[in-house]
Amino acid sequence: MSEQNKPNEGRRQLLKNIGLSVAAGAVVAGTATTANATVEKPEAKETKTNGYRETQHIRDYYETL
């Protein structure tokens, strides 16, 4: 083969490495999201509210209607 027809091995290796890096990054991002989702649990509130509460802010709004 002539020098011109030889495939560029360095370029092929670079493209393979880029593909592997992207795949590895996707796996790491997926695991990090899963780990965060399992860690973040809403804590139970000590004071329970029973629905609607009429505060001063709400009363002021009703007066404008």
Image (cartoon, rainbow, N blue to C red):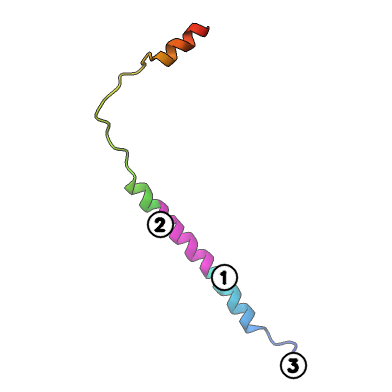
Does the segment drawn in magenta span residue 62? no
What is the magenta range? Answer: 21-33
Q: Based on the displayed image, in which of its 4 quarters is residue 55 positioned? A: top left
| Residue type at the position of mark 1 | Ile
Q: Badge 3 local density, few (<14 within 10 Å), some, or many (20+)?
A: few
Dominant secondary structure of the residues highlighted in magenta in the image: helix
* 35 to 9, vertically: above or below: above
Q: Position of residue 57 (x, y in %)?
A: 43, 16
- Specify which label sits upstream in the sequence, 3 or 2: 3
Q: Which mark is residue 2?
A: 3
Q: Badge 1 local density, few (<14 within 10 Å), some, or many (20+)?
A: few
Question: As drawn, is 42 to the left or to the right of 17?
Answer: left
- Specify which label sits upstream in the sequence, 1 or 2: 1
Of 65 and 51, the residue lying toward us: 65
Does the segment drawn in magenta span residue 32? yes
Q: CA distance from mark 3 to mark 1?
A: 28 Å
The quarter of the picture where the N terminus appears is bottom right
Query: How many numbered tags mark residues here?
Result: 3
| Residue type at the position of mark 3 | Ser
* 59 to 8, vertically: above or below: above
Please say if the residues under marks 3 and 1 sit with CB atoms less than 8 Å apart.
no
Residue to which mark 1 is pinned? 18
Q: Position of residue 28 (x, y in %)?
A: 44, 61
Q: Position of residue 11 (x, y in %)?
A: 64, 79
- Specify which label sits upstream in the sequence, 3 or 1: 3
